[in-house]
Image (cartoon, rainbow, N blue to C red):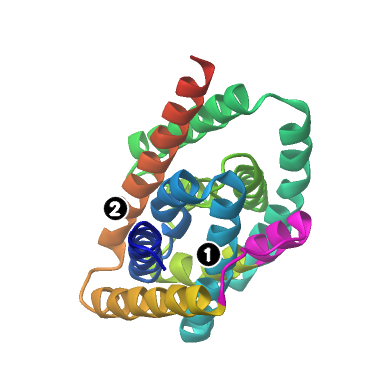
Amino acid sequence: MGDSSGLLMLGVMLSILAGALSQRATGMGFALLSAPFLVLVLGPLQGILVVNAASVVANSLILVRVWHDVDWPRAKVLVPMGALGVVPGAIAVALLPEAPLTIVVSLSVILGLGTTLLTRGHPLPPSTALAAAGGLASGFMNVTAGVGGPGVVVYARATGWEHHRFAATVQLHGLVLGIVSLLAKGALPTFSLTGWGLLLLALVGGLALGEMIARRVDGAGMMRPVAVIAMVGALLALLRGVLALT
């Protein structure tokens, strides 16, 4: 491995570590933090494949730890609707230019998060319709913009979902979306055994650090940084779409 490839792998590992740390500490953020860099250095195909594969592993490992906190009544709607949302997302990607689609989706997320921030303190009662909308938006975003978290964050903040129940349920939701995405693409990242080992090491290290942070923070207070992460991801996607038009 040469100097350039070694530095490249180091950067990939740091990106995976940061994403895993956020995923365990806040319940989400893996794709939002790691996807922009991974796509930049590995290309859109390999970058998103790495995000999907690593997310499946991260979600699985975290879900084992938080299984007892999963909010099953909400999961019964969010998870299948998220998988269903992949379908129109895939159709939209096939029919619409990437840049305009990215802009529309990003603006929708920014508007949704802005609305929930303005209505803070006046949460809406949870309902099947709201959960279905959040799940569909998450699945749609997972295909079109590479991140599925913002749709669920909008729903969580709008209904005042308890953080520890949200953080547990979103692992199950993300696991299913990751598997569906990989099956739809029919491919896995092309890394050597050494590369896979290094990625797994970074992933486990990030989860361990996130576990330490999760024990020392207020769960309810973590919803704000979660929303900030989602907003940053949406703004980055919007910038990418605007630059693609120029």
Q: Secondary structure at mark 1?
A: helix
Q: Is residue 126 visible?
A: no
Specify the amino acid type for callout 1: Val
Q: Is residue 223 above or below residue 165?
A: above
Q: Give the residue drawn at x 43%, y 76%.
A: 198
Q: Is residue 191 magenta?
A: yes
Q: Is residue 245 visible?
A: yes
Q: Give the residue drawn at x 53%, y 68%.
A: 54
Specify the amino acid type for callout 2: Pro
- The residue lying furthest to the left in this view is 216
Binning the other alpha carbons within 10 Å of mark 1 as few (below 14), some (14 to 19) or many (20 upward) gives many
Distance CA(mark 1)–CA(mark 2): 16 Å
Callout 1–callout 2 Cβ contact below 8 Å: no
Q: Is residue 75 magenta?
A: no
Q: Is residue 154 above or below residue 163?
A: above
| 107 sits left or right of 216 in the view | right
Residue 92 position, x and y percent, is 74, 33
Label 1, on which residue? 170
Q: Is residue 220 above or below residue 96?
A: below
Residue 209 position, x and y percent, is 28, 77
Give the number of the disc on residue 225: 2
Q: Give the residue drawn at x 57%, y 40%.
A: 145
- The residue lying furthest to the top in this view is 246
- Which quarter shows the N terminus? bottom left
Instruction: Please tell me which of labels 1 and 2 falls first in the chain.
Output: 1
Residue 174 position, x and y percent, is 58, 63
Please provide the residue range marked out in magenta.
176-192
